[in-house]
Amino acid sequence: MTSSHTHKWGLRNGSSNNRSHTPGKAEGKQALAVTGRAGFVARGVVYVLVGALALQIAFGGGGREADRQGALQQVAAQPFGKVMLWLLVVGFGCMTIWRASGAILDNGPSRKVGSRLLDGGRAVFYGFVCWGTASFAAGTGGSSGSDAKSQDWTASALKLPAGQELVGLVGCVLIGVGATLAVRAVMRRFLKKLETEKMSRRVRQVVTGLGVGGGVARGVVFAGVGVFALIAAVRFDPHQAKGMDATLRTFAHTPAGPWLLVAVAIGLVLFGGFSFASARWRRL
């Protein structure tokens, strides 16, 4: 009887211990979800501003570069701009942490190595974005735009052994990434990562439109930057490399005229809106 009583007490005590661990795990997961949502908001702000700057360029106005640097300058020019910049720093830092958690933490047996590596790469990317934004906010750096940075990086890479091949490989990777982003957007793969069951029919239609239009535009920009990197490698000329701003401006000089730039700019604004929707409905 004593043994039975002890056994039952042990079971109750064990289940109590399990329950004591559950809230902590749930709180940790909730904290990571909050960081992810903050990151999507920061990304959305930057893409909306970049798209708006690109629209100004398309219609013959706007002196700022249509890239992240230009977007940060826009933010800095607003009332409480310095505070807003540091909020973006926090947001991109949150995105870095969230992406890193996806690469490091155990998310179940279905989590493939490729997905972890992809999240790891994204964490590194957003880490650089966070650092650049913090440098700009602090006034200690970040004065050059994407075009100058692209040319500087290309010039340094071309001086390395097999540098021409390296730049060409980067160009091909960017083209591949751009094509993948556009195709996945058209196929609406992003819907699998959203809590669509919590959306009304109308909201789902709007979010789907944001994801498709925004994803295609983002893919076009990535591919465009990759094409110019590939041209720089083939011609062994770092001045052929272009960042986001110069790539967007090039769209205005195609046979389609400024209307291609208008379409891509609107798409970037849509992607910003999709980022805000992801902050609300992303499965985290």
Image (tube, grey):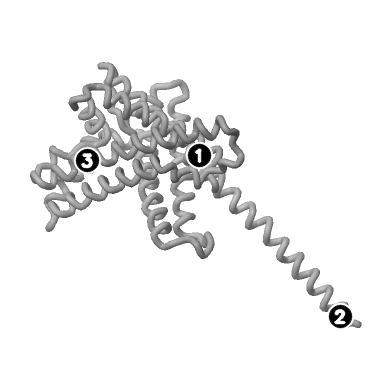
Q: Secondary structure at mark 1?
A: helix
Identity, as a three-letter code, of the amino acid under mark 1: Ser
Q: Secondary structure at mark 3?
A: helix
Q: Earlier in the sequence, mark 2 or mark 3?
A: 2
Identity, as a three-letter code, of the amino acid under mark 3: Ser
Answer with left or right where residue 58 lies relative to residue 181: left
Identity, as a three-letter code, of the amino acid under mark 2: Ser
Q: Secondary structure at mark 2?
A: helix
Q: Is residue 86 visible?
A: no
Q: Nearer the viewer, mark 1 or mark 3?
A: 1
Q: Pointer 2: what residue?
A: 4
> Residue 104: x, y in percent?
46, 60
Q: Residue furthest top?
A: 60
Per the rendering, the mark at residue 9 is none
Name which residue lies at 50% across and 39% down.
278
Q: Nearer the viewer, mark 2 or mark 3?
A: 2
> Residue 262: x, y in percent?
31, 24
Q: Pointer 3: what residue?
A: 150
Q: Pointer 1: what residue?
A: 278
CA separation in Å, label 2 and label 3: 73 Å
